[in-house]
Image (cartoon, rainbow, N blue to C red):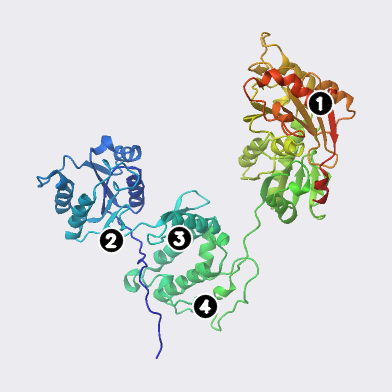
Amino acid sequence: MATYPSPTGGASLLLSFRLPRQVIVIIGSNTLAAARAFSALEADSDVVILSKGGRPAACDELRWRAEHGQLRILDMDTMPCSAQDVADRDASALEQYLAESRHVRFVCVTDTVLGMDPPLRRSNTSVQLIVRACSNRNIPVNVTDMPEYCDFSFLSTHRFVDAKTGAPSSLQVGITTNGQGCRLASRLRRDIVAKLHKEVGGAVVNVGKMRDMVRKASDVQDEVGAAELSEDAWPSTPNQPVPQRTTSENAEEEARRRMKWVAQVSEYWPIPRLAKMTKEDMSMVLDGRALAGPTVASSSTASDGAASSLHGLALCPPARQGRIFLVGSGPGHPSLLTMATHAALTKHADLVLSDKLVPAPVLAIIPPEVEVRIARKFPGNADGAQAELMEAAVKAARRGLTVVRLKQGDPSVYGRAGEEVLYFREHGFEPVVVPGVSSVLAGPTLAGIPVTQRGAAESFVVCTGVGRQGKEVKLPGYERSRSLVILMGVARLPQIIETLLADSGEPTSRRNGPAYPPCVPIAIIERASMPDQRVIYSTLQDIATALESGGEQRPPGMMIVGWSVLSLWEKGDVSVLDDGAAERDVSRLTSWLGDRRWRIVEGLDAAWEDW
């Protein structure tokens, strides 16, 4: 005789309820009550909030929903009741409300949250009386943070949206730990959702549309029944042969066959394919017509001329849709590419449109069969070259290609990513922005300079040295505890230094705040992360001379200004922000630069040769 597994207690019977026109009573009016109310409203329930103080005492969300007619809020203090004792009043008011109301299916008590102050948190005695009132009428009750009184518990749930329309779908997932770890349940739910395909909600929407098409076209619902006209009514295996269509097939047989095809499509087609089905695709599935493309098995035709079975349907997706990626290549060293950027360049790209400053070692990892175009940007032509690249990206994507717009650093940090996102969106493509390691952080780090350092720099600010269409930008004023990082400004170094040093008494519209002291340290970092990296260390008053004396410049370059520049030099100096530290700045600079006015360091740390 066959044996079967023995049940092990401690689990829950997981059910899902849709409750149109059924009443859910929620006791309490805090934010948890609002969350419970929202879940009940999405299940088409009528929601009634019972709370002490009524609407004025409710949280903002509940008040808003009450004002918009989505739910009702009743004041328990003014509800009729028969109890004389104040301690029994809430339970008595609830009991009388339940006696006079119809269709109350669940009661949730939310003003028992552990984090509430004792005067506001409902007492154990009051909870017992409320639970007894519900039990007398066989109404299940849930009491927050008191599992011993709960007839049911809430799952940690997620409702998927249709990625195509953004509207909520009928697909939900829920998870419970049966009271053994609510926070963990939320984390597991997030992990599960993250691993599912983003188009799974749209797939469910389309399968639901096919089911409806079968039912509406069959005209046999009364005879067959809704339960039988469902792919769920078939045996658990989807591989049972689909009945062949014959000329003598009646409406009931046709409906059953079509619903079986819905089951097979649901089982075997890729989720993205299901999500992208058009109405014509659905009709082809239900009519038994083969879709374009190779098949998983040769189709067969019955000897009486019946159409081929579902096994003749294609599993391949429709014509490939073009995609556009905005990708950050990092500061330059190939080992600083993110895994996502590396995958975009080596696995996905059909065409790479690269900014001119992306170094050759990064371009070298792109497979030789992938076309690479370099931006033709030069002074005075930047906007024209930018437009040229964006137009090329759209044209290639319309041909079904995957286009990678390769930018230096991070696309969103002075990389014009925003302009390109809006342009591509306007032309029908939603680009994927792939972050990169920004030179804002990587450049100073590779030069031995922290952008923040306790005792030297409590914050940092990033700005550009050149504005849109070459206009000047307003630079921040001096704060001793702050580092200033300037990108794309080395070519305008004299103007920038003049702006930073301009006497605070002189009118200037180019700086927002106090002038910088001439002795403030500055470093110019050129070709950050590359073998020919060069760093010029000096002070604001001498940096222009230092750069000119250093010979040919090596773009791209950046600047970092502030006392963090010298904070890690040799033994370090993290006393810059101590009381009275400014009085020791001259000796501090002497210790840093010696009898020189600047220092130039060539190349990367030797350790980077192994990467």
Circles 3 and 2: CB distance less than 8 Å? no
Query: In the image, residue 382 lies at what x, y percent?
Result: 77, 31
> Which is nearer the N-term, disc 4 or disc 1?
4
Residue at point 22% right, 59% down?
139
Front position among marks 4 and 1: 1
Give the residue type at disc 1: Leu
Residue at point 89% right, 24% down?
549
Front position among marks 3 and 2: 2
The disc placed on residue 168 is none
- Disc 3 from disc 1: Cα separation: 75 Å
| Label 3 CA crowd tier, 10 Å (few <14, some 14–19, many 20+) | some
Mark 2 element type: loop
Front position among marks 2 and 1: 1
The disc placed on residue 209 is 3
Question: Does any portion of residue 127 appear in the rendered image?
Answer: yes
Mark 1 element type: helix
Instruction: Name the side, left or right, on which 203 lies relative to 116.
Output: right
Which residue, given by chain and number where applicable, does mark 1 sit on? Answer: 593
> Which is nearer the N-term, disc 3 or disc 4?
3
